[in-house]
Amino acid sequence: MNTLNFLVIGKNQEILDTLKRIIENNEGWKAEIRSDENICYDYIKENQVDIVLLSSGLDEEFENDIKIFCTNLEKEVKVIDHYGGGSGLLKNEVYSLFPNLQP
């Protein structure tokens, strides 16, 4: 895996911008951010997404639906519930899903 592609979904633009900066501070990690849940399904189908990162402000029904959607795809897409905690926590969450990437 050359690049780890994230789709970060949440409602707080400032938090989304911060998460994008934190993610892209890691070599080979790329992030797209979205605050409109409705376009996320098509984005995931049409683009290479390795991780869907769920941030704050999303309703529970959408979170459950997007997890089921990702599980049923032909390609493997991991989902992380991330509600804060700093860059160290985020890295640990990612490395727990992709242990071969851990330095």
Image: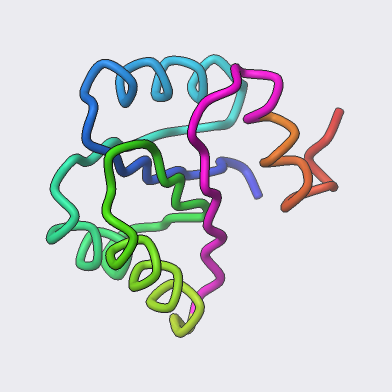
Q: Report which quarter residue 14 is drawn in.
A: top left
Left or right relative to 80: residue 70: left
Residue 19: horizontal and vertical position, in percent?
42, 23
Q: Residue at x 61, y 22 (%)?
A: 27
Q: Is residue 74 above or below residue 85?
A: below
Q: Is residue 16 above or below residue 10?
A: above
Left or right relative to 101: residue 85: left
Q: Any magenta on residue 42?
A: no
Residue 3: horizontal and vertical position, in percent?
56, 41
Instruction: Locate the C terminus and report the quarter of the image it occupies.
Output: top right
State the residue in front, 19 or 5: 19
Residue 48: horizontal and vertical position, in percent?
41, 57
The number of callouts visible is 0
State the residue in front, 96 or 50: 96
Q: Any magenta on residue 87?
A: yes
Question: Going by the picture, which residue comes out furthest to the front?
Answer: 60
Left or right relative to 63: residue 2: right
Q: Residue at x 28, y 48 (%)?
A: 58
Left or right relative to 51: residue 21: left
Which span is picked out in magenta? 75-90
Q: Report which quarter residue 64 is drawn in.
A: bottom left
Q: Residue at x 52, y 48 (%)?
A: 81
- Image colouring: rainbow
Q: Is residue 56 above or below residue 14?
A: below
Q: Residue at x 26, y 65 (%)?
A: 46
State the residue in front, 79 or 32: 79
Q: Is residue 101 above or below residue 63?
A: above
Residue 68: horizontal and vertical position, in percent?
43, 78
State the residue in front, 9 or 56: 56
